Amino acid sequence: MAGMVGRQGARTRGARTVAALLTAAGLFAAGCTGHGGPGPSDDGRGRSGTATPEPSGEGRHPSVLAVKIDNVRAARPQTGLDSADVVYAEQVEGGLSRLMAVYATKLPKAVGPVRSARESDLELLRQFHDPTLAFSGAQGKLMPLINRAPLAARTPETASGAFYRGADKAIPHNLFLRPQRLVPVTPGAEALTTGFRYGPAPAGGTADTSETVRYPAARFTFTWSQERKRWLVSMDGAPDVTADGKRLTPATVVVQYVKIRRSAFHDFLGNNTPYTVTVGSGKAKVLRDGRSFDVDWKRPKATDGTEFTGEDGSPVNFAEGQVWVVFAKAS
């Protein structure tokens, strides 16, 4: 009997070993496609397969979905940007801009165009617990840092069924994401550990109906609409609308003055990738309700959210609704 049990155990261990080798081989083959290449084609009706959803068992903290969004002229109008809870704008190579849209309370059917990640994103995302980052790829030397970061990195190579190519724009500006194939359950507001506070407007401030933030080769303008009680977004001098014609209208805009330094990475043309430093402290301007408020910001460490306070040290409330944070170079 003992010999039979031993033989059965050996056969069981052998079967497990073969299964493990087959699984490893499959994972190796799947990973050999590289990063940042073209995504799967799609006819718009979801025929390119399905992604394996992240586990959502009991005890798992809700996680935001962050998506890197293309923001050059050829990428506009964008899709799903109006559903984001927070939109971050950063400077990238050549003085252009790129967006990171963060979703927690609402997941649109599609988001895009999706583009590549940057080193600064890893620091910015540390404020969230186990976030999912959807992006098209990254510079080869940056990918190991992304893979070691405390986040779920999702690209067309690792979640092919969640991405598809649209027909109305040229590559590389036509990669889109179906968020619910990465995050099947809407995370909820508790996942937004940004440090932002919402409530009545602070006292004081200055009447302000238009603010412009300029990068070397891009600019954002936010114009207050008394009728909508929102800020109307324009990019590079043109009104910014979504693919279905909706004007982008955040309730609060933050112009956050930060250090922007050179990183160790470059694009394929040799342009250095700017690194936006979001840990530390500095000055900011909060726009809400047709007024601007000069405030201080503080984020002591990467796992903290960002606090915004007035001259007396009291927290500055944001208006309920979408928030845009535009990182501008401190003087």
Image (spheres, helix red, strand yellow):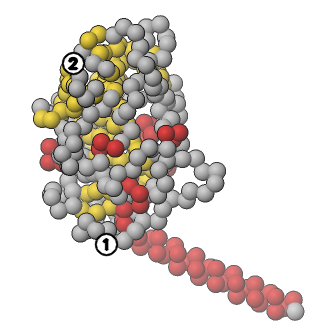
Q: For the view shown, which residue lies furthest in the right direction?
A: 1
Q: For the view shown, which residue lies furthest in the front direction?
A: 227
Element marked by disc 1: loop
Q: Nearer the viewer, residue 14 or 223?
A: 223
Q: Is residue 167 above or below residue 304?
A: below
Give the crowd class for mark 2: few <14, some 14-19, many >=20 residues within 10 Å: some
Give the residue drawn at x 36%, y 65%: 160
Left or right of 330, for residue 219: left
Left or right of 295, for residue 114: left
Q: Position of residue 322 (x, y in %)?
A: 35, 34
Q: Nearer the viewer, residue 109 or 70?
A: 109
Find disc 1 in the rendering and name its residue: 47
Give the residue drawn at x 30%, y 15%: 292
Residue 330 — which label?
none
Which part of the image, by quadrant, shows the C terminus? top left
Give the residue drawn at x 19%, y 27%: 221
Find disc 2 in the rendering and name its residue: 209
Which part of the image, by quadrant, shows the N terminus? bottom right
Q: Position of residue 239 (x, y in %)?
A: 15, 35
Disc 2 to disc 1, C-alpha distance: 46 Å
Q: Position of residue 158 (x, y in %)?
A: 41, 63
Element marked by disc 2: loop
Q: Position of residue 308 (x, y in %)?
A: 44, 20
Q: Is residue 39 above or below residue 13?
A: above
